[in-house]
Image: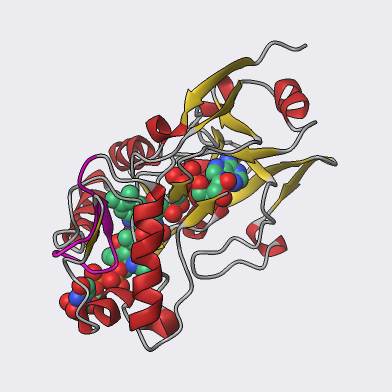
Amino acid sequence: RTGARVERLPLSRFTTLGVGGEAEVWFVETHEQLQEAMAQPYRILGGGSNLVIADEGVPERVIRLSGPLAERDLTPDPHLSEDPWVVTGWVGGGVPLPGLIRQLQKLGLSGLEGTVGIPAQVGGAVWMNAGTRYGEMFDGLHTLEIVTPEGLRQVTPDDLNWGYRDSGIPRNHIVTRVRLKLRRAAPEEVLAKMDFADQARKGQPKMKTPGCAFKNPGGVSAGKLIDEAGLKGSRVGNALIAPEHANFIVNLGGATAADVHALLGLIRERVPVPMELEYELWP
Ligand code: FAD
Ligand code: EPU
């Protein structure tokens, strides 16, 4: 054994929805520990901000990037940086995105501020190219380090077939670290862009939620479609379609995964346009 900490824990503790039964959680700090964890069926957990995890939990190992894999080196790499562009050192997949965005703003590094307010970890946000109308993760990536059961490789965004809410990286390929490519800018300029992007969240609910349930079909707001179907305020058990924004399901306290699944079923039944789920359902 290489010494990863392993504990059986309720996954509800790791999700923004606050739902999910138990699993064996592997806190991996090194590439060696990661290889060991990946020797049996596994799932990778980031900030848990896009997940609806079954009340029974999951049978696979659940990997959390910790320690050095959750650290950042934002020092410009002198060989790769060329004014006004800065290429940073490595940023771990386990780094919380909101703190990173604030730190980049203070350093006067621009490119990722459009992702303000996304409660992800860097690895999870990169894996699904999280973003808003004002920018997405692939706006600020230089190199990605990806670990698969076959080994480690480094790729650039050009090597991947990425798009809206999609990195093109296969499931269970783990984004362990990235280098960021950002532009030098005045911290006040970056802050102003962050504040502007944040305005778009004014109408989003403040309760426990995994974010938007469905991707916007063909650029139309899924929230608007669910709203037009008259579903705002629909409740099953302790899960509710938010009155503030219909593409958000919130946990009123004590909601179960089954409650959320029932609301997703209701939406699919009532909205006439086919919509692709944005959440990920475990299992
Ligand atoms: P998790 O939810 O933990 O996992 C999601 C997927 O990523 C899983 O398949 C998981 O296996 C995989 N994954 C996690 N870490 C890694 C890794 N290191 N390597 C490879 N795969 C990994 N999303 C947006 O795009 N835009 C928004 O504006 C937005 N707003 C939100 C607002 C709120 C209040 C909430 C709760 C969510 C919002 N989301 C938004 C959804 C969510 O934050 C994003 O989908 C985010 O990318 C999920 O990242 P995570 O680290 O939490 O991943
Ligand atoms: N609208 C309604 N009723 C609703 C919800 C929205 O009529 O219940 C209308 C709004 O009034 C507005 C339009 O639909 O005219 C668009 O709404 P909004 O500005 O909230 O944007 P969205 O397309 O619904 C997207 C992202 C969010 C992101 C915001 C802000 C998706 C699926 N959603 O929402 O991302 O935060 O823009 O940039 O792409 C997420 O992906 O999890 C997420 C929260």
Instruction: Determine the main secondary structure of the stretch shown in magenta.
Output: loop
Q: How many marks?
A: 0
Residue 198 falls inside the magenta stretch: no
- Residue projecting furthest to the bottom: 272
- Front-most of 13 and 144? 13
Is 26 placed above or below 151 here? above
**Residue drawn at the location 36% of the way across and 51% of the way down:** 210
- Residue projecting furthest to the right: 150
Q: Position of residue 69 (x, y in %)?
A: 58, 27
Is 22 placed above or below 267 here? above
Q: Position of residue 72 (x, y in %)?
A: 50, 29
Q: Position of residue 192 (x, y in %)?
A: 19, 55
For the N terminus, give its image quadrant: top right
- Front-most of 150 and 113? 150
Task: Indicate left or right for 101 with 67 as reference.
Answer: left
- Looking at the image, what colour scheme do you see? secondary structure
Q: Position of residue 283 (x, y in %)?
A: 58, 49
Task: Indicate left or right for 31 with 238 as reference.
Answer: right
Start-end of magenta stretch: 239-253
- Front-most of 208 and 251? 251
**Residue drawn at the location 23% of the way across and 69% of the way down:** 246
Q: Quadrant of residue 60?
A: top right
**Residue drawn at the location 52% of the way across and 59% of the way down:** 138
Task: Indicate left or right for 169 with 190 as reference.
Answer: right
Is 245 placed above or below 189 here? below
Q: Quadrant of residue 249?
A: bottom left
Res 117 visible: no
Res 283 visible: yes
Residue 251 falls inside the magenta stretch: yes
- Residue projecting furthest to the front: 237
